[in-house]
Each structure stands twice: as C-alpha cells, then as structure tokens.
Image (cartoon, rainbow, N blue to C red):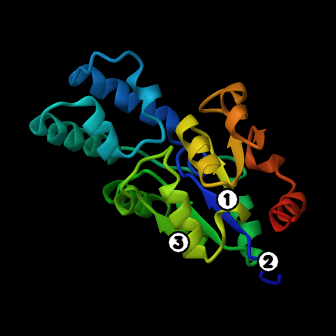
Amino acid sequence: MANLSIGFLFDLDGVIIDSETEYSKIWAQINREFPTGIENLEQKIKGCTLSKILSDNYDDESTRKAVSMRLHQLENLMHYEFLPFAREFLISLKNLGLPCALVTSSDNDKMSHLREELPEIWEYFDFIVTGNLVKASKPSPEGYLLGADKLGVQSNRCAVFEDSLQGVKAGKNANSYVVGIAGTLPASDLAPFSHIVINNLSEINLDNLIHILTQR
C-alpha cells in the first residue's frame, strides 16, 4: 500500500492486552495496604502514569517508593494475553504497511515483563511510547503527539484506540480520530470524547477508517 500519511496509535491495557481487570485488583489491594482514603482509587487512576498516580495520591517519598515496589512485585506475577481480535487487527495493519505506535502509560519495568510474556507485540509497532518518555500523563496529548511524530504523521491524521476516560481525552486533545473501546468503561462514558465507540477491534471497518483518516 502506498504511503497515505496516516497512522494508528494504540493504548496497551484494555486495548491490546487483557489486563485491566487484574490492574483493578492490584490497585485495590495496594489501596488497602497503603490507604489513600480515596474510594475506588483503581478506577480513578486508569490511564495515568505511575509517577502521576504516586504524586497525586501519596504525600511522602518513602511511601511512594514502597507503593512502586509493591506494584512491580504484583505486576511480575501477571500473565498477559492479547484481547480478542487485537492480534488479528495489528497483523492486518502490518500487512498493509500502515505505521503503528503503541502509546502506554506503563513504565519500562512493566514493559520488560510484557516483553518476556508477549515478545511478538514488538513486531507490530514502529515505535513504543512508554510512561518514561513523557512528562505529562494522559489526558495530556503529549504521548500521542510523540507517537505521531515518531511515525512521521500529523496527529489529526492518526486514529487513537483507547479504553479509558483519560485516554480518549488525550486522543481528543491530540486532535486525532478517537476510537473508544468499551469494556473497561461503558460506552456512554467514552462517547463524549470519541468519534466512534466499539466493543472490540473486529467491529472496525478498516477500509472506511483509512478513508476517514486520509480526508482529515
């Protein structure tokens, strides 16, 4: 396929891999072990980088270090799998020669474990933006703007695939075409900040999406 100067930007958890349920359990456990006084903390932090979660919810550095250590202990016990239809969709994009970037709030420690579990993910992306590469957490568009830049594509000609409220807001703030994926949150929560909302990636008509992006 000829270079259409369009790009595809993906969040990781809840979009590519099936991990959001486990992360909710992990952060609920951490909130019990290191109480913040915030009810449903695990829901309110979705899409945020670890540094933002720590700075927003824990006052002293020693607690932040302890929480970070506990998180990584629990993450290292996680087993990662592709969400249904995610691998197939990424393969379709790769076969068409369409540029893709992963834009995740996950840090390098988590990504290292992911690479041990699912090394093939790295085959599908031209660039991976981790939480360590950005200063501002979602809903800041910084990660998606960086991903688009690394692909050599204008952000408004990129599709952003997100499942969290912070994530769809970040995609909208990047002026991208936002595809909300319901599951982590109900479709009604994502719809105000998304161009379309789907249940999984099998519902995407790729030809239509390519046409939409080329016209933006």
Q: Looking at the image, tell me whether mark 2 or mark 3 is earlier in sequence order.
A: 2
Residue 76: x percent and y percent? 32, 48
Question: From the viewer's perspective, is residue 201 above or below residue 154?
Answer: above
Amino acid type of the residue tagged 1 in the rendering? Arg
Q: Nearer the viewer, mark 2 or mark 3?
A: 2
Q: CA distance from mark 3 to mark 1?
A: 17 Å
According to the picture, the residue beneath numbered tag 2 turns out to be 4
Q: Is residue 147 above or below residue 31?
A: below
> 154 or 119, which lies in front?
154
- The answer to whether mark 3 and mark 1 are in CB contact below 8 A is no
Residue visible at 53% across and 39% down in the picture: 166
Disc 2 to disc 3: CB gap under 8 Å: no
The Cα atoms of the two marked residues, 2 and 3, are separated by 18 Å
Amino acid marked by disc 3: Phe
Question: Of residues 188 and 142, which is closer to you in this image?
Answer: 142
Report whether 25 appears left or right of 153: left
Specify the amino acid type for callout 2. Answer: Leu
Can see residue 22? Answer: yes
Percent position of residue 53, x then y: 33, 37
Q: Are marks 2 and 1 in contact (CB under 8 Å)?
A: no
Residue 119 visible in the shown view: no
Give the label on residue 127, or none.
Answer: 3
Residue lying at 74% horizontally and 43% vertically, measured from the top left: 200
Q: Secondary structure at mark 2?
A: loop
The residue identified by callout 1 is: 87
